[in-house]
Amino acid sequence: MALTRAEVDRRTAGFVRSCRRQGIKVTHQRMEIFRALVGSQEHPDAEAVHRRVRKRVPSISRDTVYRTLSALESAGFIRRTEVLEGPARFDANMDRHHHFICTACGAIKDFYSEALDCLPIPKSLKTFGSIESAQVQVRGLCSTCIGRKAKGR
């Protein structure tokens, strides 16, 4: 479900307030990088973020994008979504949710499930360390890839 312009603006305003509370400078580059993520349902990788932001800020470097994504992740504004193949992808949806990952095209879609939110963490995991969060990844073919496969493409 795509976010409305009002929701993107609301989340961006929240980002600015949180940055100021944490003493993080609110630069034009950080704003544009965050806006590129929060307005996307695609979970872009750093290169895709760079391409999007360059349309609005032609002088932005890849290094700035990579460093900013790392800083935003460290500050808790975005999450890194690891996939089995390819570069890490980024997600600005900080609501509790899970991911469907297409094994053919790599598309990542958010979904919500109270049942999965309530799955108990096995006690044996405590031997690994302290659990900070849990998220389920469901893998399969997206409807677009199923359609392509049915048409023989």
Image: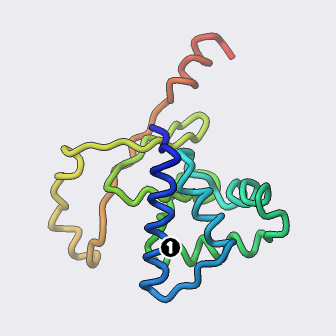
Q: Image check: 76 left or right of 53? A: left
Q: At label 1, which amino acid type do we have?
A: Val
Q: Residue at x 51, y 43 (%)?
A: 108
CA neighbours of label 1 inside 10 A, class few (<14), some (14 to 19), many (20+) = some
Disc 1 is placed on an element classified as: helix
Q: Residue at x 48, y 66 (%)?
A: 13
Task: Give percent across and percent down for residue 147.
Answer: 57, 17
Task: Give percent across and percent down for residue 67.
Answer: 66, 77
Q: Residue at x 79, y 60 (%)?
A: 54
Residue 78 or residue 9, whichever sits in front: 9
Task: Give percent across and percent down for residue 91.
Answer: 50, 57
Q: Image check: 103 left or right of 151? A: left
Task: Give percent across and percent down for residue 33.
Answer: 64, 64
Q: From the viewer's perspective, is residue 117 above or below residue 129?
A: above
Picture quadrant of residue 95: bottom left
Q: Residue at x 68, y 58 (%)?
A: 49
Residue pointed to by mark 1: 16
Q: From the viewer's perspective, is residue 106 above or below residue 37?
A: above
- For the C terminus, which image quadrant? top right
- For the N terminus, which image quadrant? top left
Q: How is the structure coloured here?
A: rainbow
Residue 128 or residue 21, whichever sits in front: 21
Q: From the viewer's perspective, is residue 60 above or below residue 90?
A: below
